[in-house]
Image (cartoon, helix red, strand yellow):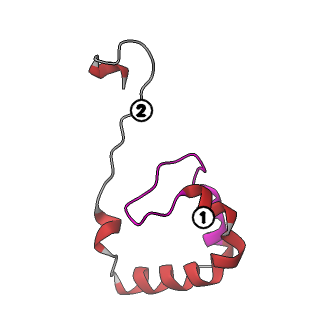
Amino acid sequence: MSINSTRKRISAIGIKKSIVPDGISGEILNFGVEAMIPDLTRLLDITMNNNANPGCWKKPVVVPIYKGGDRSAVGKY
């Protein structure tokens, strides 16, 4: 994975997104992106080439988003 590819992937993470299991928010990633890119690129290369993703990367986090109206109606999320 190239540094430009890593930069593009990180910039696609919304700053308003919820925090993932590792505790890092999209805002933090985007704030310090330039300093982290070489290390993140190396980490992603290692994990992708060895097919060894940390267990927490495989756990989905589902957060219902309220869309307005009656909060007790399931269809409003």
Q: Residue at x 49, y 79 (%)?
A: 44
Quarter of the figure that contains the C terminus: top left
Q: Nearer the viewer, residue 44 or 66?
A: 66
- Position of residue 38 measured from the top left corner of the image (x, y, whole percent): 64, 83
The Cα–Cα distance between marks 2 and 1, rounded to whole angstroms, is 22 Å
Q: Residue at x 63, y 77 (%)?
A: 36
- Position of residue 51 measured from the top left corner of the image (x, y, whole percent): 34, 81
Which amino acid type corresponds to the residue marked 1 in the rendered image? Leu
Q: Up-down: is 7 above or below 14? A: below
- Quarter-wise, where is residue 8 in the image? bottom right
Confirm or deny contact between disc 2 and disc 1 (CB under 8 A).
no
Q: Residue at x 65, y 59 (%)?
A: 11
Q: Which region shows up in magenta?
A: 5-25
- Position of residue 7 measured from the top left corner of the image (x, y, whole percent): 66, 68
SS of the residue at dot 2? loop
SS of the residue at dot 1? helix
Residue farthest to the right, as pictured: 34
Q: Residues within 10 Å of mark 2 (few under 14, many from 20)?
A: few
Which amino acid type corresponds to the residue marked 2 in the rendered image? Ile
Q: Main secondary structure of the magenta part?
A: loop
Identify the residue under disc 2.
Answer: 65
- Quarter-wise, where is residue 53 in the image? bottom left
Identify the residue under disc 1.
Answer: 29
Q: Residues within 10 Å of mark 1 (few under 14, many from 20)?
A: some
